[in-house]
Each structure stands twice: as structure tokens, then as C-alpha cells.
Amino acid sequence: MVMHTLRKDNDSTSLHAWIESESIQQEIALVLGTQSSAILAGFAFFALLWTHKPFPIWLGAALVHVVVFVIRVWFFKKSKRLSPSEASHFYVTHIYVVGLIGLTWGLTTLLVNEQAPSNTELLGHVIILVYATASTIYLSRHLPSMRLFIASFIGGLLIASFVRWVLDHDFSFSLDHTVLFLVSLILGFVLLRFGEQLNKSHITTLTLQFQNTALLKSTTQERDAALAAIESKNRILACTAHDMRQPVLALDIYTKWLQEDPHLSEEITPKIASATRDVLLQFNALYDLAELNQNQTVVNIQSVHLKTLIEEICMQHQAVAMNKGLELRTHLLDATLETDPVLFSRLLGNIIGNAIKYSHAGGILVAMRRYHPGRLQIEVWDTGLGIPDHEQGLVFEAFYKSKAQNGTNDGFGLGLSIVAELSRLMGFTVTLRSRVNRGTMVLIDLNVKQNNPTPVNINSERL
């Protein structure tokens, strides 16, 4: 339940971040696409007042609008040149530019309040209102910037109304200015509600787009995973046929020899037994791998005395190591592990078996090391052929055999792939370090309850 909640929170956070970034990108594109309209609105407004305002006042107001327009162009064009994440950060940190634009157009109503002819005043207010409405529409993609623009615009209207009130009546009561004050507040409320409804619709559209994109990505990943699974199965079949061909052909030849000359039984029987063992090993490995890949393996967790279990596993491999002239040693701690003893035995047994298989001299060391309280690592060291650096990430794949091990006839490249699946199933981390012609160390990282452990010092320079 906790993991589900965390995953849901992460998805919600990524959705919110994507919507904000996408909204800002769309808003920047829309505003830049309306630069010519903004220029025409400013030109029409000041052309309307050309003959109705003293030139110094007209020029001063026009210069203010030009400066604000230049700042607007710089702000949005620089935002567009940045990457989406950088543009979002730049936009949010410089959002005051949007407020400056709204404040400038709100204060501009000072030029068309009362002293101008009625038609000019009306047309001026219409131009300002149309500009504010269009800006609300464009800025509705990003709610904070839209709210800032409307608040600044209405603030400018109220300041202009207050200034005109002071200039005209010297703080005396005026019904016209009171009505203008109330109309400004109503206009701000209407613009705000209108912009919020547009933003809500925009967010809904982006949410559906995000979900559709995520669904498409998930479908693509599932398709790729299915194709990869099919390719993997085909590769397994091809590798299986290749690896089993030799022992099966050998069995066919040996049986024909026995049919032709039964007196060869003493010589041929061991060869038949060896070929049969190879086939059985292949079948067993394939069965284990198939069972793990299909998640049919049941994990039975129980408290296991780790030292005793590892000693039993090593005892099972002792005879094989001795037959090859290898020394199999252990250096263990007294600890308890909550795990499935059968699956753990298969995991560690495959690692030890692999170490014996590819070692021709020296020995194998199975050791436990304590790095942190409550945490142990099992290390299997060998003095075998070793694995080149560029192949160490591949040896956990099914049927992969290092080129350094081409001289070995035993094995089908399934041991470490089964180890990888078992470690994933039981929640362990398995890694390796290796040097060609020096040996390999496979490490299993465990979480355990320890009983008076003593640290083990292993000379890492051995490899």
C-alpha cells in the first residue's frame, strides 16, 4: 500500500511538472505569435489620442509602452530559446514582466478618462478591454501568470481611477468614480473567472494528452518486451539445439557401436553415461530457467542458520573440486538469514559450481564479510580463467559464455543466468569482479540478523 501511494505521488508530481512546463511552452508560443497584434493595438490606441492629448503627455505614455513592449519581447524570446526545463525556471523567476505589462495597460486608462471626447474615450476603453481579454486568453495556459496579469491590470485601473478622482474633485465624493471603481472590480472578477475556466479546460486536455502518451509508451514498452521475450526464446531454442546436438549425436554413435559390437560395452558405457549426464544437466538448467522466468517458483521464507547451510552446500561440491585438484575452503560468520533455503542453495551452488568449472588450478574460497551492522556479504573467490571487463555485464545472460572460457567443454552458459533470476526473486544483489587469468569474485549482498559476528579480512589483491 505504501509503495502504491509513493508511486502514485511520483506520477502526480511528474504530471504536474510536465503540465506546468508544457503550459509555459504553449503560452510563450502564443504570445510570440501575437506580437504583431500587440503592436497594432498600441498603434491604434496612441493614434486615437494623437489630437486629443498634449504632445509631451502623449509622447511620455508612448515611450513607456515601447519600453514595456521591448521588455516583453526580450522576456518571451529568451524563454523560447531555452530548453523546456530552463525556460520554465526562467519564466517563473521573471514572471514580474507579465505583471508589468498588465499594470502598464491598466494605468493607460488615465489617458481616456473623462477629459477626452466621449467617442475617443469609449474607443480607447474598448481597445484596452480587448487587449486585456486577449491577454487573459493567451495567458490562461499558465494560471499564476494569468492571475498576476489580471491583478496588475485591475490594480492599474484602480490606481488610474483614484488619481483621476483626486485630480478632478480633490477627494470629494463622486458617483461616477465610485461606479468606475466597482466596474473595475467586477471586470477583474469576470476576467479571472473566464481565465480560470479556460485554464481548467486546458489542464484537462493536457492531462489526457499526458495519460495517452504514457499509455502509448507503456504499450510500446510491452510490445518491445514481448518481442524481446520472443527473441530470447528463439535464441534459447537455437542455443539449446546447438549445445545438445553434440551429446545427442554422441549417444546415437555410441549405441550404434554397441549394436555392431557388444564387446565394446566396457569402453563405451562411460561415454554414454557422460553424454547422458550432459543432456540431463541441460534439461535441468532449462527447466530451472523456465520456471524462474514464468514466476512459477514459490519462495518459502524461513529462518536459516547461514553458516551451517553454506557448509552443507560446500560439502556437496567438495568431491568435484578435489577431482580437479582444487581446494575448496570457507571462512564464515555465525549469522541467521530469513530466506528460502532451497533457492538459496541453488543460487550459491550455481556460483560455486561455476567457480569450480572454470578453475584448473588453485582453489575456491567461500567467505562472509561484514561491512555494516545487520548487513553481510557472501563472496566466492576462484583462481579460474577470469572474465574480460567488457564481458562482465553479459555473463548473467542465458547461454552466454565468455570467450576466455571457450576452451571448456562443460556447461551451457545458464548457471549465472539462473543466479541472476534467483537473486532477483529473493531480493539479493549479485555482482562480480574479475581479471583474466587471475580469477573471479562473485559477491552476494544480504540483509541478515547476526549472532556475534567477527569481521573477515580478505586480501583483495589476490585477484
Image: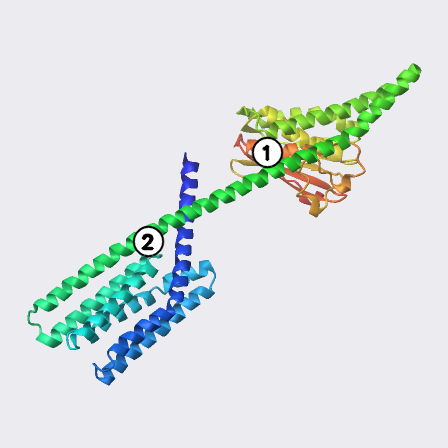
Mark 2 Cα shell of 10 Å, populated few (<14), some (14-19), many (≥20):
many
Q: Is residue 357 above or below residue 170?
A: above
What's under tag 1, amino acid-wise? Answer: Ser
Of 386 and 314, which appears nearest the observer? 386
Q: Quadrant of residue 165?
A: bottom left
Specify the quadrant that holds the C terminus: top right
Query: Disc 2 on helix, strand or loop?
Result: helix
Which scheme is used to colour this image of the protein? rainbow
Q: Report which residue position mark 1 lands on.
A: 423
Give x and y (percent) for residue 288: 65, 27
Q: Residue 299: x, y in percent?
A: 55, 25
Relative to 321, is 195 on the left or the right?
Answer: left
Outermost residue to the left: 172
Front position among marks 1 and 2: 2
Residue 137, x across and y down, in percent: 32, 59
Q: Is residue 80 above or below residue 460?
A: below
Quadrant in the picture for residue 220: top right
Image quarter where the N terminus lies is top left
Which residue is tagged 2? 199
- What residue is rendered at 79% in x and 39% in y? 406
